Image: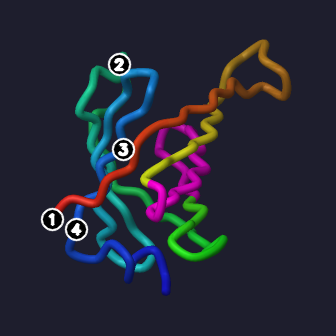
């Protein structure tokens, strides 16, 4: 089963321990829309991006997308345990390799 088949017709609520909160809608087998429900500090609060995903196990998927501003998100969505881990990287002058980075962990809930 693909991640799109898993979540089709539902919203994915992603509530990180950092306080960041998003809702993700999978629009098709290759496109998603994320909406920030928390303050994102000058960044867009919503965006539609192409994504790639692979199944890592039963109800566990790695989902990757690149945002317009150059943010790269690599997310492990564990629907079975309701957990999410996301590695973010973005252009940042002076950082190693010219990229800033962050790991976020939190709760994942299917809504609808």
Residue at figure coordinates x 33%, y 67% from the top left: 26
Residue at figure coordinates x 42%, y 32% from the top left: 16
Which x, y percent locates residue 77? 51, 57
Q: In the rendered view, would you say 112 is above or below 94?
A: below
Foreground mark, 2 or 4? 4
Foreground mark, 2 or 3? 3
Label whose residue precedes the other's in the sequence (2 or 4): 4
**According to the image, label 1 marks what residue?**
112
The numbered dot on residue 14 is: 3
Q: In the rendered view, would you say 13 is above or below 3?
A: above
Alpha carbons under labels 2 and 1: distance apart = 30 Å
**According to the image, label 4 marks what residue?**
10
Alpha carbons under labels 2 and 3: distance apart = 20 Å
- Are dots 3 and 4 in contact, CB under 8 Å? no
Q: Which residues are magenta?
A: 64-81
Reply yes or no: does residue 71 show up in magenta.
yes
Which x, y percent locates residue 85? 57, 44
Say which element carries label 4. loop
Label whose residue precedes the other's in the sequence (4 or 1): 4
**According to the image, label 2 marks what residue?**
42
């Amino acid at each position: 089963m693909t991640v799109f088949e898993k979540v089709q017709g539902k919203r994915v609520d992603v509530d990180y321990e950092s306080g960041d909160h998003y809702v993700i809608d999978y629009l098709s087998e290759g496109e998603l829309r994320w909406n920030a429900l928390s303050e994102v500090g000058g960044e867009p609060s919503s965006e539609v991006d192409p994504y790639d995903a692979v199944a890592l196990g039963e109800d566990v998927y790695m989902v990757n997308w690149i945002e317009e501003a150059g943010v790269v998100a690599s997310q492990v969505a564990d629907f079975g345990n309701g957990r999410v881990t996301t590695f973010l990287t973005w252009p940042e002058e002076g950082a190693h390799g010219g990229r800033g980075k962050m790991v976020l962990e939190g709760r994942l809930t299917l809504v609808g």
